[in-house]
Amino acid sequence: MKILHVYKDYFPVLGGIENYMKVLAEAHAAAGHQVIAAVCDPGMATHIEEINGVKVIKSRRWATVASMPLSISHPLIVARLKPDVVHVHSPYPLGEVSAWMFKARVPLVITHHSDVVRQQGWLRLYAPLLRRVLKRADRIIATSPRYIETSPWLTPIKDKCTIIPLGVDHRHFAPPPAPFDGPPTALFVGRLRYYKGLDTLLHALADVPEVSLKIVGTGPMQDEWEALAHSLGLTERVHFLGEIPDADLPAQYHAAHCFVLPANARAEAFGTVLLEAMASGLPCVSTEVGTGTSWVVQDGVTGRVVPPQDPAALAAALRELVGNPEKRRAMGQAGRLRVETEFTQELMTQRVMAVYASLV
């Protein structure tokens, strides 16, 4: 089978969608399929690379506006390819335009990673195109049932949606033989963007003096959140660690008592880091923002789900987990089992391939 993935970036660019596409592409290439990734590149000329068996076509990118590449060659190159199935990763207007050029000649699969949340001005222009492309799609992949239930784009067309959760390399994050017994420590991993809600977590920590926090990642909110930590008197307990190589991430999870993802907006559509934490045997604290975060974490079973932007509720959840080793251990074990049975990369790639096979 000849499979074409369409998105704006590909490895070595790091990001949730980029990693998802890379995992699918490499797994299906290793299984003997011909896999192409059509993306954009800020370089001066279109070029082709082969990365771990995947043919990556990087079209020239003239500029980037509202996170979307501007490229004349990208849709033209995509239109000349002759795949058996096209897989577009949305939201990505240029990719949807490119897929639209295939019309009904080729089966179209769309993974709807997230609604457009913040860029409402662009959404007015983008909405008509997105509706047409979603209507044209043969199958739409959603990463959780919660997102179908709450998305104004997916709910009207739920009959053509298939739920395929994201997956992680559960072996990479396997918990150590003995749990971490150091000082009470919470962990956050992710890009430091507004919707991650770290300001809420910092305010919560001000009321939980026994807990320290490690923050892995960088992003546009780092300076503001470092200043907030300083103003709250948390500099001795909050540690901004910056980017950590993938190979070193398990050690960060294993040196914590719980994981926290205090998201405050639907832009946090799933939370792959929650799977990494659960695979590491950690209980998780997430928030109810109407997305996969409160489906991945089962309140009272694998962790706690609290309201967004509620420092008091978040502080209470931290006290509960840090102060109760037996509960923390039971939730961590339940989370690890949930990942092994529902959220492995093998399951994800097999389920996506089954969608392709049903259409070709």
Image: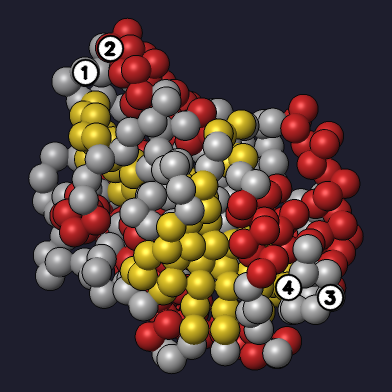
Q: How many marks?
A: 4
| Nearer the camera: disc 3 or disc 1 | 3
* Label 4 crowd bin: few (<14), some (14–19), many (20+), radius 10 Å: many
Tag 2's secondary structure?
A: helix
The residue that label 4 is drawn on is 108
Q: Are marks 3 and 4 in contact (CB under 8 Å)?
A: no
The answer to whether residue 40 is visible is yes
Of label 2 and label 4, which has the lower sequence position?
Answer: 4
Where in the figure is residue 159, as x and y percent of width and height? 84, 73
* Tag 4: amino acid: Leu
Q: CA distance from mark 4 to mark 1?
A: 50 Å
The answer to whether residue 144 is visible is no
Q: Residue at x 70, y 48 (%)?
A: 93
Quarter in which the C terminus is drawn = bottom right
Q: Nearer the viewer, residue 335 or 219?
A: 219
Q: Are marks 2 and 4 in contact (CB under 8 Å)?
A: no
The residue that label 3 is drawn on is 104
Of label 4 and label 1, which has the lower sequence position?
Answer: 4
The reply, left or right, for residue 158 in relation to residue 167 is right
The residue that label 2 is drawn on is 230
Q: CA distance from mark 2 to mark 1?
A: 5 Å
The reply, left or right, for residue 311 in relation to residue 84 is left
* Tag 3: amino acid: Ala
The reply, left or right, for residue 189 in relation to residue 236 is right
Q: Residue at x 52, y 53 (%)?
A: 59
Q: Are marks 3 and 1 in contact (CB under 8 Å)?
A: no
Of label 3 and label 2, which has the lower sequence position?
Answer: 3
